Image (spheres, helix red, strand yellow):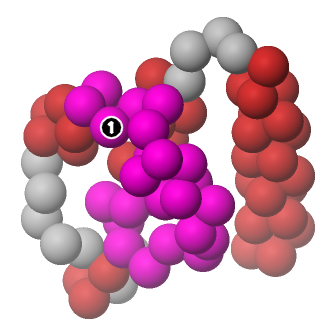
Amino acid sequence: MDAETVIGVRTPQLRKYAKTIANSSVAKAFLQALPHKYYEENNLHAFLIEEIKATAGTNEIYNRENNINRSVFLFCS
């Protein structure tokens, strides 16, 4: 991991922030703003997905995330 891509925000703080902004317009915009540059942004992205409540949009986001994860895997392979 490149040191320039790490900000230094602790995981508990990211989890707390994810709970604070989950299901907000800020979270929605953040989840759509890809790719993320920083390690902590990727972690926050994952924590937001964990916090998404079971709604109609959840399946859409889940499917999009799976497609992105497959693309990243293929790119890195």
Position above or below: 63 against 59: below
Q: Amino acid at mark 1?
A: Ile
Q: Give residue 17's position: percent from left, percent from top.
A: 22, 39
Taking the image as shown, residue 75 lies to the left or right of residue 25, namely right
Q: Residue at x 13, y 57 (%)?
A: 9
Position above or below: 22 against 77: above
Taking the image as shown, residue 35 lies to the left or right of residue 63, namely left
**In the image, residue 23 lies in the stretch drawn in magenta:** yes
Q: Give residue 14's position: percent from left, percent from top.
A: 23, 43
Position above or below: 14 against 57: below
Specify the farthest residue to the top. Answer: 54
Q: Residue at x 25, y 31 (%)?
A: 20
Specify the farthest residue to the front. Answer: 25
Quadrant where the C terminus lies?
bottom right
Q: Secondary structure at mark 1?
A: helix
Task: Name which quarter of the figure residue 47 lies in.
Answer: top left
Front-most of 68 and 52?
52
Q: Give residue 71's position: percent from left, percent from top.
A: 85, 65
Residue 47 in sight from this viewpoint: no
Q: Residue at x 41, y 32 (%)?
A: 22
Residue at which label 1 appears: 21
Quadrant where the N terminus lies?
bottom left
Highlighted range, magenta: 18-42
Taking the image as shown, residue 30 lies to the left or right of residue 61, namely left
**In the image, residue 56 lies in the stretch drawn in magenta:** no
Front-most of 18 and 72?
18
Task: Name which quarter of the figure residue 58 lies in.
Answer: top right
Taking the image as shown, residue 56 lies to the left or right of residue 32, namely right
Query: Magenta segment, principal secondary structure?
Result: helix
